[in-house]
Image (cartoon, rainbow, N blue to C red):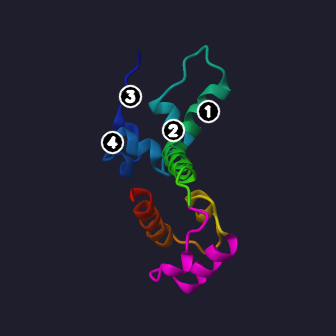
Amino acid sequence: MRLFRFSTLPHPLRRLRLRGIVYSNKCTPEIFRKIFPPPPEAPIEAGEEAEIQAHYSGYLNRQEDQVRRLSKLENVKIPEDFDFSSIVTLTREVREKLTKIRPRSLGQAARIPGMTPAALGILDIHISRIHRK
C-alpha cells in the first residue's frame, strides 16, 4: 500500500484536513486520484463516480434532509374549517393565498408560491395549538 504525502499537494491545500481537501473546489481530479488511487482492477468509471460522490456528498446529504423535513410536513394536516385570516402575524398576501387555495397539509402550504419559512412556522404553531386541544 502506497502512502500519500501531503507535501505533494499545492500549498493552499496542505493546511486542510482530508475532508476539506476533497470538498474544496481546488481539489482537481488529478489531486483526488493522488489521494485516493483506484484499485488496478477497478474500471475507470468507478474512480470518476467516487470523485463525484466525494465532491457532492454534502449537497446530497442536505437535499436528503430537506426531503425528510418536507415529508414530515405532509403528515401535519390542516383542519378543513381552519380560519387562515385569523392569523394576523401572517402577511395579508399569505393569508389570502392560504384562504383561496385551502391546503390540506403543511406540505401543500409549503409549495404555495410566496410562502416563506417564517410563515410556515407561524402556521405550524397555530395548527399544533388546535391539535393539542
SS of the residue at dot 4?
loop
Task: Name the quarter where the C terminus is drawn.
Answer: bottom left
Q: Residue at x 39, y 45 (%)?
A: 20
Please tell me which residue lies in front, 104 or 119.
104
Please tell me which residue lies in front, 1 or 95.
95
Q: Which residue is mark 4?
A: 17
C-alpha distance separating marks 4 and 2: 14 Å
C-alpha distance separating marks 1 and 3: 21 Å
Magenta includes 99? yes
C-alpha distance separating marks 1 and 4: 22 Å
C-alpha distance separating marks 2 and 1: 9 Å
Q: Which numbered disc, 3 or 2, marks the residue that appears first in the sequence?
A: 3
Q: Amino acid at mark 3?
A: Phe
Q: Report x, y in % for residue 69.
A: 50, 50
Q: Residue at x 55, y 52 (%)?
A: 70
| Residue 54: mark | 2
Q: Which numbered disc, 1 or 4, marks the residue that appears first in the sequence?
A: 4
Q: Nearer the observer, disc 4 or disc 2?
A: 2
Check whether the beta carbons of the residues at disc 3 and disc 2 lie within 8 A of each other.
no
Q: Residue at x 57, y 79 (%)?
A: 95
Q: How dense is the environment of label 4, judged by Cα within 10 Å: few (below 14), some, or many (20 and up)?
A: few
Q: Amino acid at mark 1?
A: Glu
Q: Which residue is mark 1?
A: 49
Q: Residue furthest left?
A: 15
The magenta region covers 79-101
Task: Name the quarter where the N terminus is drawn.
Answer: top left
Magenta includes 117? no
Q: Which residue is mark 3?
A: 4
